[in-house]
Amino acid sequence: MSFEHLGRRYEIYLQSDVHRDGMALELMDETEHPYVLVLEVFYADTDGALTLTAHREAVPLELVERVTSQAKLRLPPSNTR
């Protein structure tokens, strides 16, 4: 899911993480190489918790809202809803 915001190009990726036992949506800034992880919403299989981790200090609220709304739709895995 690629989109632009304020002249920058972003992509949202669905990831599985076996080490942390869960799944995540990651927002990557793909404006230039190397791509940069901006934020992550993680679903923990162990307790069902959804957590957000920002990897930049100032993330526009519009980006946070976009990723969190997608996370609510795509996480947790459909077989646990």
Image (cartoon, rainbow, N blue to C red):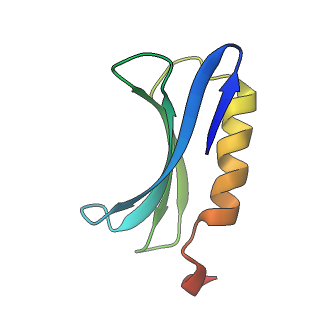
- Residue 6 appears at what percent x and percent y? 71, 15
Image height check: is 40 above or below 36?
Answer: below
**For the point 68% across and 26% down, which residue is it?**
4
**For the point 72% across and 41% down, which residue is it?**
66
> Taking 63 as reference, is 48 left or right?
left
User: Disc count in the image?
Assistant: 0
Image height check: is 47 above or below 8?
Answer: below
- Residue 33 appears at what percent x and percent y? 36, 18
- Residue 61 appears at what percent x and percent y? 73, 28
Q: Quadrant of residue 17?
A: bottom left
Quadrant where the C terminus lies?
A: bottom right
**For the point 68% across and 32% down, which residue is it?**
63
Quick one: 68 or 33, which is closer to the camera?
33
**Residue lying farthest to the left in this orientation:** 19
- Residue 3 appears at what percent x and percent y? 66, 33
Image height check: is 39 above or below 9?
Answer: below
Image height check: is 40 above or below 14?
Answer: above
